[in-house]
């Protein structure tokens, strides 16, 4: 299986490490229509500005589906041959805050993806490499995101860790 044959690609790393740019370059290089599934919500001014920056960085012509919760359904209705989910980190947070079962929703995402013949790139943050959070909610979030990242890495054809803007291949086809 070549680099281009990878159907599920997980891109992880720390905050501002270049994950989104790497995933966008990969999606663009595949040469097919791209659907961008955005999970961020503009709940405050700083996040609204971040969302605007991300929107401006996307190539024109990409379909954008803004979906903070129903990501499996968005994946199925997306028109592009290449799907870019940015990001799992916020989706997990959104699901937690909505009282949803995160790992069940992730399995629903993988099941929906299995129904397609598309390529899916998933951007996520690696949050388990720092200090142990001082409150129960943050620890639960860290643990759920870690479990979700681990499950996606297991299912993925390729996994890349972005460190200071440099992609490090963790798993490849």
Image (tube, helix red, strand yellow):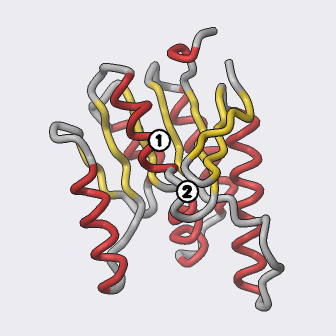
Which residue is tagged 2?
17
Residue at (54, 14) in percent of width and height: 5
Give percent across and percent down for residue 145. Answer: 69, 62
Which residue is tagged 1?
22
Q: Is residue 169 above or below residue 70?
A: above
Residue at (65, 63) in percent of width and height: 101
The part of the image, by quadrant, that contains residue 81 is top left
Question: Mark 1: which secondary structure?
Answer: helix
Query: Mark 1 Cα within 10 Å, few/some/many (few <14, many 20+)?
Result: some
Q: Is residue 172 above or below residue 18?
A: above
Point out which mark residue 51 bears: none
Give percent across and percent down for residue 134. Answer: 79, 90
Instruction: Work out which residue is located at the far right of the displayed protein and give it.
Output: 132
The answer to which of 119 and 51 lies nearer the viewer is: 51
Instruction: Work out which residue is located at the far bottom of the displayed protein and give it.
Output: 135
Q: Is residue 47 above or below residue 91?
A: below
- Please give the count of numbered marks on the rendered protein: 2
Give percent across and percent down for residue 50. Answer: 34, 70
């Amino acid at each position: 299986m070549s680099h281009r044959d990878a159907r599920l690609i997980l891109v992880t790393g720390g905050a501002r490490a270049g994950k989104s740019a790497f995933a966008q370059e990969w999606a663009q290089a595949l040469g097919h229509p791209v659907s961008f599934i955005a999970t961020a919500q503009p709940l405050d001014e700083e996040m609204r500005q971040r969302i605007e920056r991300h929107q401006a960085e996307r190539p024109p012509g990409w379909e954008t589906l803004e979906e903070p919760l129903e990501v499996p359904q968005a994946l199925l209705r997306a028109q592009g041959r290449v799907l870019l989910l940015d990001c799992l980190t916020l989706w997990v947070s959104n699901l937690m805050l909505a009282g949803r079962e995160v790992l069940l929703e992730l399995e629903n995402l993988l099941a929906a993806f299995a129904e397609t013949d598309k390529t899916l790139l998933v951007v996520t943050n690696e949050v388990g490499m720092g200090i142990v959070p001082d409150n129960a909610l943050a620890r639960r979030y860290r643990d759920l995101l870690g479990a979700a990242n681990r499950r996606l890495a297991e299912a993925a054809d390729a996994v890349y860790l972005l460190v200071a803007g440099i992609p490090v291949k963790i798993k490849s086809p």
